[in-house]
């Protein structure tokens, strides 16, 4: 397994240790997520995720089911990039339905049919476009297929509600 794939697969690892640098997402507010990217680990931010995210004590948490690339009619484009863009638009709509914003997403799990390294650029672009510098923890899971045969991508999220 290549180093890049190994790091993507461990992207969701939560590390609890002393001596790690932390960066809060806004004004040291106790209701905000804390991003943790230990200096002694590979820097995942160029690939669109953080090593770990600490959820504030007592926070309410919501779980968003996997969002695929279906448009509002249920149609799926055969193009991977189009499905990814639509899936993130669908995730944004789900967040809006919760009254949440992207900076409240603590963790993403993404599923990619027939994953290969050529798809990473599309994935990284979309996640950085949606999340900016507040990158959630993320795990990429290569799969042979998803619930619907033409579906090529799915993203689920864990969200901290305020």
Image: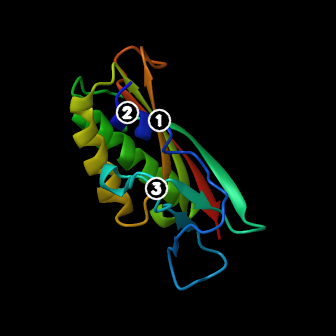
Q: Tell me, for residue 9, which label it has, or none.
A: 1
- Asked if labels 3 and 2 touch by Cβ distance under 8 angstroms, the answer is no
Residue 111 on image: x %, y % = 44, 30
Indicate left or right for 78 with 1 as reference. left
Q: Position of residue 26 (x, y in %)?
A: 51, 80
Does residue 107 sit above or below 1 in this rendering? below
**Residue name at image x 73 percent, y 62 percent:** 60
Of label 1 and label 3, which has the lower sequence position?
A: 1
Relative placement, left or right, of 103 versus 124 is right
Tell me the residue that label 3 is attached to.
Answer: 50
Q: Place residue 159 in its image quadrant.
A: bottom right
Q: State which tag comes first along the sequence, 2 or 3.
A: 2
Helix, strand or loop at label 1? It is helix
Q: CA distance from mark 2 to mark 3?
A: 15 Å
Q: Is residue 65 above or below residue 93?
A: above
In what element is the residue under mark 2?
helix
Foreground pick, 80 / 125: 125
Element under disc 3: loop
Q: Quadrant of the C terminus?
A: bottom right
- Whether label 2 touches label 1, CB < 8 Å: yes
Q: Residue at x 25, y 50 (%)?
A: 125
Q: Which residue is mark 2?
A: 5
Mark 1 Cα-neighbour bin, 10 Å: few <14, some 14–19, many ≥20: some
- The residue lying at 43 percent from left, 65 percent from top is 134
């Amino acid at each position: 397994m290549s180093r890049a794939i190994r790091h993507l697969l461990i992207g969701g690892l939560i590390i609890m240790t002393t001596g790690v640098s932390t960066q809060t997402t806004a004004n040291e507010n106790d209701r905000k997520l804390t991003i943790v990217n230990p200096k002694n680990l590979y820097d995942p931010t160029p690939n669109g995720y953080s090593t770990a995210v600490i959820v504030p004590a007592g926070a309410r948490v919501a779980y968003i089911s996997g969002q695929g690339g279906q448009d509002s009619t249920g149609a799926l484009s055969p193009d991977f990039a189009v499905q990814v863009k639509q899936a993130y638009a669908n995730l944004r709509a789900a967040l809006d339905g919760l009254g949440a914003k992207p900076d409240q997403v603590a963790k993403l799990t993404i599923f990619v049919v027939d994953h290969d390294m050529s798809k990473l650029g599309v994935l990284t672009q979309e996640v950085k476009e949606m999340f900016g510098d507040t990158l959630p923890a993320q795990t990429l899971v290569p799969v042979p297929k998803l619930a619907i045969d033409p579906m090529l991508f799915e993203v689920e999220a864990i969200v901290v509600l305020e």
